[in-house]
Image (cartoon, helix red, strand yellow):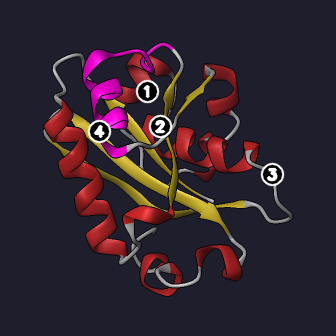
């Protein structure tokens, strides 16, 4: 499973979410059909622009609790001072993507495939299972972008 995690401000538009995901997929070479969930903090999951974006892409939203996301803080590749001030997390996008993959189960630890990228009022990160058969193509290219 591959999850796209998102952090965003209240000014984010559905177009910014789409552009951020498109860029993340382009950079990693991962196909859009591989994204199993769009993750964010549970208090942001109902944001109108985020729901419109998810609906237009027919991808489920994974609402992640603050405490669950915080469990992945040490696994983040980046840190945003604004995110740390507002949420206590170094990267909402990275933490929620990792937490969603971990919640999906599987035998391997979640792995950050793409550290957060910023597009307008949106950040996006990709995480997946470290198992090669789940990630298949895109894994080797993405590994170079996660650090």
Q: Earlier in the sequence, mark 1 or mark 4?
A: 4
In the picture of the structure, the residue carrying the numbered disc 3 is 105
In the picture of the structure, the residue carrying the numbered disc 2 is 90
Whether the magenta-drawn stretch holds residue 25 is answered as: no
Q: Residue at x 80, y 65 (%)?
A: 108
The overriding secondary structure of the stretch rendered in magenta is helix
Disc 3 from disc 1: Cα separation: 27 Å
Disc 1: CA contacts within 10 A as few (<14), some (14-19) or many (>=20): few
Disc 2: CA contacts within 10 A as few (<14), some (14-19) or many (>=20): many
User: Is 103 drawn above or below residue 51 in the view shown?
Assistant: below
Disc 2 + disc 1, Cβ < 8 Å: yes
Disc 4 from disc 3: Cα separation: 26 Å
Q: Residue at x 14, y 39 (%)?
A: 15
Query: Residue 102, position in %: x, y?
Result: 73, 48
Q: Which of the image's four quarters has the C terminus?
A: bottom left
Q: Earlier in the sequence, mark 4 or mark 2?
A: 4
Q: Earlier in the sequence, mark 2 or mark 1?
A: 1
Query: Residue 34, position in %: x, y?
Result: 50, 64
Disc 3 from disc 2: Cα separation: 24 Å
In the picture of the structure, the residue carrying the numbered disc 4 is 56
For the residue labelled by badge 4, is the local secondary structure a helix, a strand or a loop? helix
User: What label sits on residue 84 in the rendered view?
Assistant: 1
Span of residues in magenta: 43-57
Whether the magenta-drawn stretch holds residue 53 is answered as: yes
Q: Residue at x 39, y 71 (%)?
A: 31
């Amino acid at each position: 499973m591959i999850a796209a995690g998102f952090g965003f401000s209240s000014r984010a538009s559905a177009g910014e979410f789409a552009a951020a995901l498109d860029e993340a997929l382009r950079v990693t070479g991962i196909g859009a059909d591989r994204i199993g969930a769009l993750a964010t903090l549970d208090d942001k999951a109902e944001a109108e622009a985020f729901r419109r974006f998810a609906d237009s892409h027919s991808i489920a939203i994974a609402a992640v609790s603050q405490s669950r996301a915080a469990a992945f803080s040490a696994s983040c590749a980046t840190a945003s001072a604004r995110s740390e001030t507002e949420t206590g997390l170094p990267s909402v996008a990275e933490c929620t993507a990792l937490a969603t993959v971990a919640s999906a189960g599987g035998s391997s630890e979640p792995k950050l495939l793409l550290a957060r990228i910023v597009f307008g009022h949106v950040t996006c990160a990709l995480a997946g299972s470290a198992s090669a058969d789940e990630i298949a193509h895109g894994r080797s290219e993405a590994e170079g972008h996660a650090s």
